[in-house]
Image: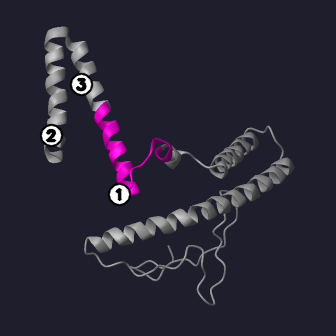
Amino acid sequence: MKAHLRWLAPLGVVVTASVAGHYMGLGVGLLTLGGGVLGGVIWLMWASLQGLAGDVPLTLDEALSLGAPSTEEEQKRSVLRALKDLEYERAVGKINDADYAILADHYRNEAKRLLRAVDADLGPERERAEQILAERLAAEGFEPAPAAAEPGALEPGASEPNTGALAGEDAPDAPAAKSPTSDAVP
């Protein structure tokens, strides 16, 4: 029955829109078609959210919380926006270089702190998502991929990479790669 609904529902919307358009005018027909398409999109989104939750039905509050940004994410966006505004003010001459350096350093440090907090908040959810994916792949007969190193974890003897660099910060120079066709450095 569900397989038939996939084809009957859109067909029903098109037929209803055609009948409404024939008897009540093109505008009403297009509105009916648009309403049917909107309803279908909402139904598909809801079905995909339920699929993410597994066999447990997803409540409306849970669905809304999936898309809601955390406090740290909102603060991160505002700090990054402030950095961008600060760059603009410096470019147009509204702020001198000394004040820019102090404010940019403050905002960059705050952005780094917030990025670490967001990553820490997502850790348990990332592990849960990986577990669900592994279970579903195993259920479908796929072999699980080898366990990757934890993000941010260093291998023994490795030095700390500069991953916290934001726009405008100096990054360490990487060794230049040689061109495959010559010994010259590109």
Q: Tell me which numbered mark, 3 or 2, is placed earlier along the sequence.
A: 2
Q: Main secondary structure of the magenta part?
A: helix
| Marks 1/3: CA–CA distance | 32 Å
Q: Does residue 42 lie above or below 177 as drawn?
A: above
Q: Amino acid at mark 1?
A: Asp
Dot 3 alpha-carbon crowd within 10 angstroms: few under 14, some 14 to 19, many 20 or more? many
Q: Which residue is mark 3?
A: 33
| Marks 3/2: CA–CA distance | 15 Å
Q: Which residue is mark 1?
A: 55
Magenta region, residue range: 39-63
Tell me where residue 51 sits by quadrant.
bottom left
Residue 9: numbered disc = none
Q: Tell me which numbered mark, 1 or 3, is placed earlier along the sequence.
A: 3
- Provide residue 108's location: percent of width, then percent of height: 73, 56
Q: Which residue is mark 2?
A: 7
Side (left or right) of 94 relative to 14: right
- Provide residue 89's location: percent of width, then percent of height: 74, 40
- Camera-nearest label, 1 or 3: 1
Asked if residue 41 lies in the magenta stretch, the reply is: yes
Q: Amino acid at mark 3?
A: Leu
Q: Amino acid at mark 2?
A: Trp
Dot 2 alpha-carbon crowd within 10 angstroms: few under 14, some 14 to 19, many 20 or more? few
